[in-house]
Each structure stands twice: as structure tokens, then as C-alpha cells.
């Protein structure tokens, strides 16, 4: 699953679909660069809203014995099928492309909700930082070698007329590679990972799940540090997700070629892998909270630098800054910090709430960037506006304890 979903994130979400395939189809249909970027932002907002709504409900049901993996498989299947369907969308049908992109992204992000919840089943609190960060690091390696490399090679050879196919056909081949890689690298988790923490089955499971969900909602304020952390997470992950998902579209708007974007993204994956592991080790030494501050601060620099971005060199510098902190720095340590706060038998339910805050944040960020870009006609102003989100998240994060002090004082208990 590590390499499979990461391949989707890199090839479909970031590297090929937005800057090469979708942008080309939108341009062919007469859509301006600024408007196509805005429509992509609105599309991301739509599928994240859908998942934010259903995540806690499905997560609560999935807490029953044996259901976590079933939900995981269902969303994974949706993602793989919809990615495969992108291959058959007629040229110029940019709206239909966005529809299947929505379904594919819904499947990928939905599967990741349950994948994240498996963290409590495969390790303990002391190892969570390093295991979570290592997962992201291996994900980068698994997605860059070989599917991304092969995909880039095919597209570049097609662009240079070395291969007798068009860039559109080359992109479709990359989609097929993504599907195949996703299936192959999901086999280990399907065979070897089991749900160790769960709630025993009971009569009327759906009705009981809703009761547990409503109970948690009514008493969420009692989980003091969990609530504060989720609020901080809401703001800073908003900026992170928006920058990652919109980066290549932004690069296209400022005139960077598809070749430059692909090479930069490949190097980004390679650089991100060791940094993820480094963040995990430093989190064990200092604390996940301290390293979250480091990651947020780097992203604030990214927002400021992005405003002045003009050349390919600037984009390279920006990409390396993002690579240093995106996975292991913020995403992995946020996941491990949160996993230490929750009751493990209710991991799916609580990761559903984690998903709500993360996905609702991913709604506001793209809308903010898209609207700012569309109104001003300048993508760099949208990037700069994200600075406020990181600043608010950093301030709120101050009020949660170090993860080294969590055990024994913040464990919530459900009745």
C-alpha cells in the first residue's frame, strides 16, 4: 500500500494529471490557465468535502472486528477503477476528466483513512514516530522507483518523438502503470496486516455505531488536548495539502515546461525519503511537537518564497524545501502524535475525525487559492495567502503538550 497509494499521489495527483494531461485537455477546450487551475481547486474541494462527511461514519462502523480491512479494500478498489477509467475519457472532455479524478481521489484518500488507522495495529506508542515517518519515506522510494521513473521516461520520449506515440497516449500509459503498481503494492497489507484493536460485534451494528459517533461528538470537548491539536492541525495541514496538490498547476501557470516539472518532482521524491526518516529520528530525540514546529516554519518560508517565484531555479529551490518537510516532517508526525492521543479500539472513528479536520482544511485552502488566482489572475498571490494558515496552526499547537508527556494524562476513554 505504501508504494501503491504514493504512486497515485505522485503520478495522478501531482506530476502528470494536473500539469500535463488535464491542463492540455482544458487548453484544447478553450479554458484559460487561471480558470483551469481554479476549476482544479474547486474539484479538490468537492471530493474532500464528500470524504469529510462520510469519514467518521464509516470509521465508527469499521471499529468492529474485521471491518477495517473491508472498508480499506472498498475505497482502494474505487480508486484503482477510477484511475483506470481516466484512460478511456475522450480527448477534450476536461469536465469528465475531473469527475473521474474526483472518484479516483476519493478512493485513494478514503483508503488512506483506514491505512492510517492501522498504525495502532502495527506498532506501539514508543515507536510510532519512527514507524510513521519510515512509512512515508518508503512511500517516496516506492512511488519514485520505478513507476514514476518509467512514466517520466515514456512521456519525455514521446515529447521528443523518440516513441511513436503522443503525449496524451504517454500519459494514459502512466495511468495504467499507476493502477498496476497500486494493485501490486497493496498485496502485503492485504496478506499480513490485521486489525488487532477493535470493538466486538453487537446486534444492530450500524445503529450502535451512530450512537457511539454521536456520543463522541457530544463529548469531544472533554478530550482537551486532542481537540486543541485537531484545531491546530486543521490550519497548518490546510496549507500543506494545498501546496502539494496545486504545485504543478502553479508551475505550469508561471511558464515551466512539463519536462522541468517532471524532473523536479522525481528529485523531490528522492530527497523526501531520507528527510522523512531523519524527522522520525529527531522526533524520537526531541519530540514530534518540536519537529512539527520545524516543518511548519519551513512551509512558511515556502509561501513567502513562492510569491517571488519566477524561474525554473526558483521552482527547484521551492521543491527542495517542500521535500524536506512534507511527508516525514508534518504528515507523518501529525499522524503519530494523534495516534498516541486516541483509544486504540476506536482508532477508525477517531481517524475519521482526524480526516474531517484534514479534509475540511483541504476544502478551504484550494478554494482560497483558486478564488484569489481567478480574481487577481496571479497564482503567486494565492500561494502567499496560505501563510496565515501556517501561522495560526503554529500558535494553536503551542497549547498541546509534548508527545513525550502524553502517555497517562491524555488518553480518552469512551463509555
Image (tube, rainbow, N blue to C red):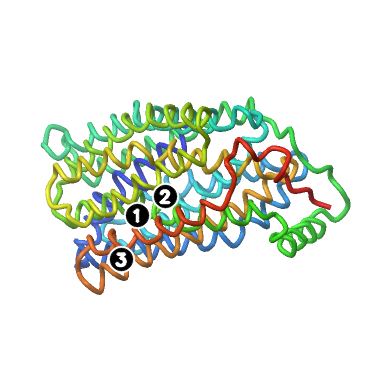
Q: Is residue 345 left or right of residue 300?
A: right
Mark 2 crowdedness (10 Å alpha carbons): few <14, some 14-19, many ≥20: some
**Contact, CB < 8 Å: mark 3 with mark 1?**
no
Query: Residue at image x 28%, y 34%?
Result: 266
User: Which of the two residues, 51 or 186, is positioned nearer the viewer here?
Assistant: 51
Does residue 285 appear anywhere in the picture? yes
Distance, label 2 to label 1, CA atoms, is 7 Å
Residue 173: name its quadrant: top left
Cα gap from disc 3 to disc 1, whole angstroms: 21 Å
Q: CA distance from mark 3 to mark 2?
A: 23 Å
For disc 2, the marked residue is 85
Q: Quick one: 26 or 66, which is closer to the camera?
A: 66
Q: Residue furthest right?
A: 203
**Which dot, 3 or 2, sits closer to the camera?**
3
Note whether 38 is above or below 101 in the view shown.
below
Describe the element under mark 3 as helix, strand or loop.
helix
Q: Position of residue 117 (x, y in %)?
A: 63, 41
Q: Is residue 1 visible?
A: no
As helix, strand or loop, the secondary structure at mark 2 comes to helix
- Apparent side of residue 321 relative to residue 122 in the rendered image (left or right): left
Disc tally is 3
Q: Residue at position x 25%, y 74% from top?
A: 375
Estimate the x, y position of residue 213 in percent, counting from the top left: 74, 59
Q: Camera-side residue: 372 or 278?
A: 278
Res. 38 mark: 3
Q: Residue sitting at 28 percent across and 59 percent down?
A: 383
Q: Which residue is mark 1?
A: 89
Q: Image check: 65 left or right of 151? A: right
Q: Are marks 2 and 1 in contact (CB under 8 Å)?
A: yes
Mark 1 neighbour density, 10 Å: few (under 14) some (14–19) many (20 or more) = some
First in sequence: mark 3 or mark 2? 3
Q: Position of residue 63 (x, y in %)?
A: 73, 46
Amino acid at each position: 500500500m505504501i508504494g501503491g497509494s504514493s504512486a497515485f499521489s505522485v503520478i495522478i495527483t501531482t506530476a502528470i494529471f494536473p500539469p500535463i494531461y488535464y491542463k492540455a485537455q482544458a487548453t484544447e477546450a478553450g479554458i484559460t490557465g487561471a480558470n483551469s487551475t481554479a476549476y482544479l481547486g474547486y474539484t479538490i474541494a468537492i471530493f474532500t468535502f464528500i470524504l469529510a462527511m462520510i469519514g467518521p461514519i464509516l470509521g465508527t462502523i469499521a471499529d468492529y472486528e474485521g471491518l477495517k480491512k473491508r472498508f480499506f479494500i472498498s475505497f482502494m478498489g474505487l480508486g484503482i477503477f477510477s484511475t483506470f477509467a481516466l484512460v478511456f475519457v475522450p480527448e477534450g472532455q476536461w469536465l469528465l476528466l475531473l469527475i473521474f479524478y474526483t472518484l479516483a481521489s476519493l478512493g485513494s484518500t478514503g483508503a488512506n483513512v483506514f491505512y492510517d488507522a492501522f498504525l495502532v495495529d502495527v506498532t506501539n506508542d514508543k515507536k510510532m514516530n519512527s514507524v510513521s515517518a519510515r512509512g512515508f519515506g518508503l512511500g517516496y522510494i516506492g512511488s519514485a522507483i520505478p513507476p514514476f521513473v518509467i512514466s517520466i521516461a515514456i512521456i519525455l520520449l514521446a515529447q521528443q518523438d523518440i516513441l511513436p506515440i503522443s503525449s496524451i497516449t504517454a500519459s494514459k500509459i502512466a495511468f495504467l502503470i499507476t493502477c498496476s503498481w497500486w494493485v501490486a503494492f497493496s498485496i502485503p497489507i492485504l496478506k499480513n496486516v490485521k486489525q488487532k484493536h477493535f470493538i466486538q460485534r453487537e446486534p444492530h451494528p450500524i445503529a450502535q455505531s451512530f450512537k457511539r459517533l454521536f456520543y463522541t461528538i457530544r463529548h469531544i470537548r472533554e478530550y482537551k488536548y486532542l481537540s486543541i491539536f485537531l484545531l491546530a492541525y486543521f490550519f497548518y495541514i490546510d496549507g500543506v495539502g494545498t501546496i502539494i496538490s496545486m504545485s504543478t498547476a502553479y508551475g505550469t501557470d508561471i511558464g515551466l515546461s512539463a519536462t522541468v516539472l517532471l524532473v523536479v518532482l522525481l528529485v523531490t521524491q528522492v530527497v523526501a525519503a531520507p528527510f522523512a526518516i531523519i524527522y522520525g529520528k529527531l522526533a524520537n530525540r526531541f519530540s514530534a511537537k518540536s519537529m512539527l514546529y520545524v516543518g511548519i516554519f519551513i512551509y512558511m518560508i515556502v509561501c513567502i518564497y513562492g510569491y517571488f517565484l519566477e524561474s525554473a531555479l526558483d521552482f527547484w529551490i521551492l521543491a527542495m524545501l517542500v521535500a524536506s518537510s512534507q511527508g516525514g516532517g508534518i504528515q507523518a508526525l501529525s499522524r503519530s502524535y494523534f495516534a498516541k492521543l486516541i483509544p486504540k479500539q476506536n482508532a477508525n472513528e477517531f481517524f475519521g475525525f482526524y480526516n474531517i479536520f484534514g479534509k475540511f482544511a483541504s476544502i478551504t485552502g484550494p478554494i482560497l487559492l483558486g478564488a484569489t488566482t481567478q480574481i487577481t489572475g496571479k497564482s503567486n498571490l494565492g500561494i502567499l495567502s496560505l501563510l496565515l494558515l501556517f501561522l495560526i496552526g503554529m500558535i494553536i499547537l503551542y497549547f498541546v503538550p509534548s508527545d513525550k508527556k502524553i502517555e497517562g494524562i491524555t488518553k480518552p476513554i469512551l463509555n
